[in-house]
Image (spheres, rainbow, N blue to C red):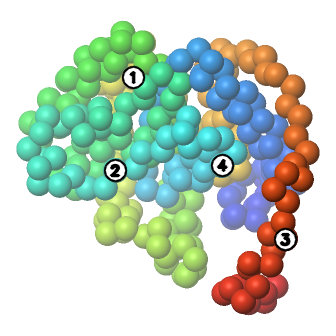
Amino acid sequence: MAKTEDKNGNGESKLKRKKYEKELRRLQAELCRLQEWVKHKGLRIIIVFEGRDGAGKGGTIRAITERVSPRVFRLVALPAPSDREKSQMYIQRYMQHFPAAGEIVIFDRSWYNRAGVEYVMGFCTKEQHRRFLELCPVVEAYIVDGGIILIKYWLEVGNEEQERRFEARIEDPLRQWKLSPIDLPSREKWYEYSRARDMMLEATDTKHAPWYIVHSDNKRKARLNCIAHLLKLIPYEKVPRETVRLPKRSDKHKYDDQAPLKGRHFIPEIY
C-alpha cells in the first residue's frame, strides 16, 4: 500500500476519517459491553499508559473513555508529588487509586515515572531508580496475585513524528496548553529516554505483567489497534438486560411548568 501523509501529517498509509470514525464507534460499542461485564463480574482492572512525550497517550485514553461511564472507567493523572507524598513509600500515592470491584482504573502515567522522567531529568537518585526496577516486578506480582488484571501499554513514537508534534504544539494556540516544562528538555534528551525505556522494559516486562508496545506515529491507527487489543485481552460476554420502556409523562399534578421561567436569566441564543 502506498505511503502518504494523512491530515495529521503522519507518514503512514492513510486511514480516512470516515473509516476511522466508523471503526472507532464499533470498538467503543464493544467497550460498553466490556463495561457491563466488568460490573457484572466485579472485575478489578488497571491499565497503565506510558510513552515518550507527544506519543499520543491522551488521545488514546480519550478514545477509550469518551463513550463509557467515568464511574467504571476512572482516569487517574496525578500531578507532581507534594512534599508529604515525597516522604511516603514511592508507590503509596498510586495505590490509593487502585480499583474496587467493577472498576477499570486508567493511569495516564503511573509509578513508571520513576523509570522515565524522574530518572532522565534527575528527579530521583540512581539508587532510587535501581531499587525501583528491582522492586517493581515484585509489587506488580503482588497486585496480580491479589486478583487485579494489570495491563501496561507503551506508546512508541518516532523521532521525526515527535518533532512534528512538538512544533505543532508551539505554533497552534489550541495545542499550546499541551506543552509542559518537561517537554522541550525531553526532546533534547531523546537518547537518554531511549536508554531509560530499554532498562525499564528489561526489568519489568514480565510474564505476570508484560508490556505491550503500540506504534503511535499514526494516531488513528494507534487508537484503534490499542482498543482492539484491549478487548481481546479481557474475555467478556454480553450481559443480559431487561427490556427498557420509556414511561409516559403522568398528567397528575399537571400545571404550566414553563410559566415560572418567564423573566428569568436566559443566555443569549447566538447560534
Residue that badge 4 annotates:
66
Tell me which label, 4 or 2, sits earlier in the chain.
Answer: 4
What x and y, as percent, mark residue 45? 49, 25
Front residue of this view, candidates 182 and 234: 234
Q: Which residue is mark 1?
A: 205
* Residue 11 visible in the picture: yes
Badge 3 density bin: few <14, some 14–19, many ≥20, Cα 10 Å: few
Q: Quadrant of the C terminus?
A: bottom right
Q: Amino acid at mark 1?
A: Asp
Q: Is residue 123 left or right of residue 117?
A: left
Distance from the alpha carbon under mark 1 to that under mark 2:
23 Å
At x 59%, y 23%, the residue is 39
- Give the label, 1 or 4, closer to the camera: 4
Quadrant of the rendered image containing residue 202: top left
Amino acid found under the numbered disc labelled 3: Asp
Distance between the alpha carbons at the discs numbered 3 and 2: 48 Å
Q: Which mark, by number, is residue 78?
A: 2
Kind of residue sitting beneath label 4: Glu
Q: Amino acid at mark 2?
A: Leu
Residue 267 appears in the rendering:
no
Disc 1 or 4, which lies upstream in sequence? 4
**Badge number at residue 256:** 3
C-alpha gap between disc 1 and disc 3: 65 Å
- Contact between marks 3 and 4 (CB within 8 A): the answer is no
Choose between 28 and 168: the one closer to the eye. Answer: 28
Under circle 4, the secondary element is loop
Task: Between residue 207 and residue 23, name the one nearer to us.
Answer: 23
- Give SS at disc 3: loop
Q: Are marks 3 and 2 in contact (CB under 8 Å)?
A: no
